[in-house]
Image (tube, helix red, strand yellow):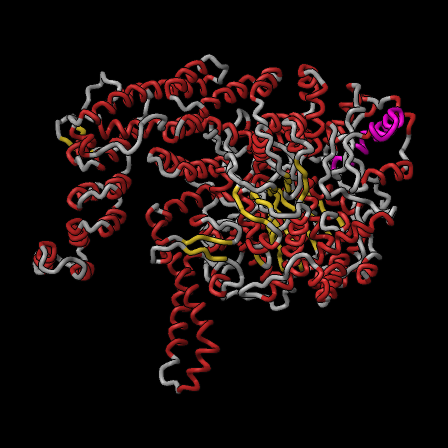
Amino acid sequence: MTSCDAGCVLPANSFLPFCVDNLNKESLTLYVQMIKSKVDEEDYWHSSKFKAFTFDDEDDELSRLKESRQAVNNIRRLVEEDDDEDDVERVSWSGEPVGSISWSVKETAASSQRADREPAFPKISTDTPSISRSQSGYSLSSLFKGKPKVGNFQTFSDALTDSSVRLYAPELRKPKSEYKDYVSDWSPEETVQRLQQGKAVSLERFRTLQDKLLLLDHAIAAHDGNVITAVLIYLKRTLCKEVLFRELESRQTALRHFIHYLSETQNQRLLLELHRALGKAEDAALLQYKEHLSITDENKRRDFLKNCLSLPFSAEDLAHVQDHYTLLERQIIIEVTDRQAECGGKVEIFQKFPRKALILNMPLITTLYYCCFYHYAEPEGTFSSPLNIRQTFKISEKQYFVTALAARAKLKAWLDVDALFASRNWLGFTRKKSPLSFQRVVDILQKNSAPTHVLQDYVALVDDGELRLTLAQKHKCHDIVISTYRDMKDRQLLLGYRGKVVRGSAEERKIDDLLSNPQIRWKN
Amino acid sequence: MAHSARRDSPELPDFSILKRLARDQLIYLLEQLPGKKDLFIEADLMSPLDRIANVSTLKQHEVDKLYKVEHKPVISTSDQLCFLIRPRIQTVKWICDVVNTDKVPGKSRRYKIIFTPQKFYACEAVLEEQGIFGDVSIDEWPFYLLPLDDDIISLELPEFFQDNFLAGDQRWVRTAGSALHLLYSLYGPFSKVYGIGRCSKMAYESWREQVEEGEQKARQAEIGNVFLIDRDVDFVTPLCSQIVYEGLVDDIFRIKCGCVEFGPDVTASDKSVKVMLNSHDKVFSEIRNEHFSHVFGFLSQKARNLQTAYDKRQGMDIKQMKTFVSEELKGLKQEHRLLSLHIGASESIMKKKTKQDFQELLKTEHLLLEGFEIRECISYIEEHINRQVSMIESLRLLCLLSITENGLLPKDYRSLKAQYLQSYGVDHLLTFSNLRQLGLLVEQQPGETLTVMESKVGKLVNDKTAGKLTDAFSSLAKKSNFRALSRKLNLVPKTDEEYDLRVPRDMAYIFSGAYIPLSCKLIEQVLERDGWTGLEEVTRLLNGHEFAVTGSSGVDSRGKNDTQRIILVMFLGGCTYSEISALRFLGREKGYKFIVVTTAITNSSRLLEALLDNHV
């Protein structure tokens, strides 16, 4: 393969798609060029066990696929030739099963390609407290060992990377003593670095607490969450939880990784213990409360929520959880009664408006709406009475008003709607009062397709004249528009509006009457 | 359109090579499992995969059947199963179940897991725990970067946001560093790197280490400077309603991987249509960055032009007609199709927005940004909640209120929270706890008002408090200081001035002239000043973590002015289409070309949905 030889000026593995580390533009362009030159080689295609294929639309696709195919082919060749290239870092991409615990054994040669030039960009401080060696202390062995020499492992690792060898445990290949020396050679720093690079490394040598913590602190300093979690998994396995929790308390970054790991692996039990051990009772309570979401049976869920009431929530949250429990309890009762009423076929409203969904597990306001819809007139003593619900859950006047309004409007019960606004002053006159702006009232009514004659009453109550006019125009409340123009003595606008009403309608007549009324002094 | 574009903007590098690279890598991996195999693809990898390969590509490499990962028992009869997944523990657990189920009747198959963009030790630990380590082969597909358009590249990792900012898990830091390194290897060397945010700093470090580990040959740089920014530096911008066309389309129809599905209400037929939205769409590329109020006029003008072009047919002789059909008609038809789609979309947007009183909503947002009539805003939000208008929308307004006001008064917080839980369910207790942790929705602490006063006055806050912020917890749930920042950087233009949206004068046009996105303003300022000098007060208010570093190669490429004006902006935790539009505007004004790299495209809904915790 001649074109490949040209390519070999670069380290062979820079052709491997996986070595992003080494992948630079040159290698890629070269690699692409190389592919291009091969496209002509028809015999490649003839010798290939795969048939060439065609696309209906694009030739381009085909050539690109050819390239890919050849790229793959080239890579394979390069891999086979790899043996000659001792000084080249290898990355295990083949996915060979690597047998033993904690990614311990799979070994690749150390990078001998370390650039000895000045770093192009400077290091910046990343705020992690520098690791105090005195605090954790190196183990004796690492103190005496010094830096490992890369060359020492070369032959050994060569044997290991040989893709034809299936390696399950190094113990089988090397005498025990030698193996031990070999794995214990990595300092915490180097171990973290290798973990970061996805290279296999053993954590088993970190046995003293100091060693473990030193390793953890180096992982934290490297800012690589993947590595931090890897170390934490090892610590979880090799430290009792009391010690682990204690050490995590002073390492917030690691703690958060651990919490995330436990919640992802759904280790609820340990997570709760951790929160409690750290004195985060409220977090633990919330976490436990969350479990209710996975309980589908409503009675079991209710009982679970009842038990939650004894959890150490904040006073505020406890009140919410209490409400949650009370609400579900009540929904269960309402659901049973209403289902019977619906099946019995005797209650008119359920026949006219069959229920679309169960009321179980709905929010409080939805429940209130439901009760305003199906149980509006019930006396306050029943569980499903809107007034009772309002009382029990301390629903604000405005909130109650909005919900009742929407529900009654939906039923087109305009008398009920009207009654909601009724208020008597001390002289006994009724006037319409609303905790909600009338503009919003109109909006709610209109969304429930209230007829114009209903809308009109409420549009008229909008305080702001300009807004009232806009709303009246929008909702075709002609009377309001017409009388507003009359009050403004604006003949021109009135004339203009005449074109917008239905010809021959009462509104048109009204406009005509006004326009011909000699008593009005028009301003234009 | 009407922009006074500088003509000398440099050309963007060609990013299609990234797609080819990713595809070749995938094909190579598939070849590692020779013979027929069934491929299981993680649901959210389907769209990115579609952008770089198609089914026939996979079939050519002996993929027999394709399945979506659904966490259900598999029905495949193939004796080779390949799983293309994100490194997620739940997915790996499912695979373990599949393998262990096969083991019971002694069924023997070959399994391969391809993690993308990388594997995590935690996933391998699961394989080990479940006793199937060694039974499956593991590979990594370093598919870091997906070009969504000429100037947008996405990592397609939406979980980056919650993992990093909510959970405080730094698993994606190295991924971000590697993605940057890939760009550096192909289009570098960079001259300068600026950044702000904890994660940005760590990603920079990770990248720098990878540069040191690898080799770099001297080469003509295609990207000049780099700006890294954490999403939590600016939460205000992604929480605002988007009004620029592309952002609006994303808010309403949800653009997925550069592609949108328009439903029957847009297409005016009974079918839905999937449309790629990028610079190749001639109609879209002209309106994507425009304020929506501007779009209708443009589209109708375009429609008239099209009519004129069609009308040319009248009075043509046969020969002319032949040329017309062969040369122009196809283009016209294409344009016609696109035009009617975008008109349909605009109409649908109008309908939806008038229905929900968009004007009033925007008014409230603008008041919050300006800090006026906060009481009215609160009662607006309250009504929103009372009426059970969209759960996400209510949450968005609450968060916007909290960030702009530096937290809610305890009494307001309690009352709004209670009403929210009543309207949308008590389950949202967990959502509120998440929002508090992230600092998006908080109560003002007693004495906090004093601190706000102090920050207004200036340097009264001693440096010790700033120093304490390095603690992971406090920096994740930091104070926003939005008011002070807004004043310092003039983010909210004076209201008494008329703002002509047709001729935008600054980036505020993307929010109707009401607000210049903080993220983009920072970028503008740092590029202008060539660093953070003079912005000390601003960075202090943003809790620090700013940096500006020069590469050794930066000096010799000084002369190459064009490259210096190509700026790569990397958003860690997502960016919005509005921000991209703002940067495009800035680029046109100042002669830069921006390349936006983001962990994912985000918007207010996606951002908040990631924080909802009312489900299992």
The percent position of residue A199, horizontal first and vertical second, equals 76, 37
Overall secondary structure of the magenta section: helix
Query: Most extreme residue toward the front, as rendered?
Result: B106
Please report the residue visible at 42 percent of the width from the left and 65 percent of the height from the top.
Answer: B337
Q: Is residue A247 left or right of residue B167?
A: right
Residue displayed at 44% across by 80% down = B324
Relative horizontal placement of residue B449, taking residue A316 as reference (left or right): right
Using the rendered image of the protein, determine whether residue A309 is visible from the camera's viewpoint: yes
The image position of residue A40, as x and y in percent, is: 71, 68
Residue B197 in picture, x, y percent from top left: 65, 40
Relative image position of residue A292 (x, y in whole percent): 45, 22
Magenta stretch: residue B254 in it?
A: no
Front in this rendered view, residue B189 or B394: B189
In the displayed structure, B74 sits above or below A509; it is above
Quarter occupied by residue A109 = top right
Task: Write down the quadrant of residue A514 in the picture.
Answer: bottom left
Magenta range is A171-196
**Rendered view: A181 above or below A312:** below
Q: Nearer the viewer, residue B466 or A406?
A: A406
Say whether residue B49 is left or right of residue A393: right
Q: Residue at x 58, y 32 (%)?
A: B102
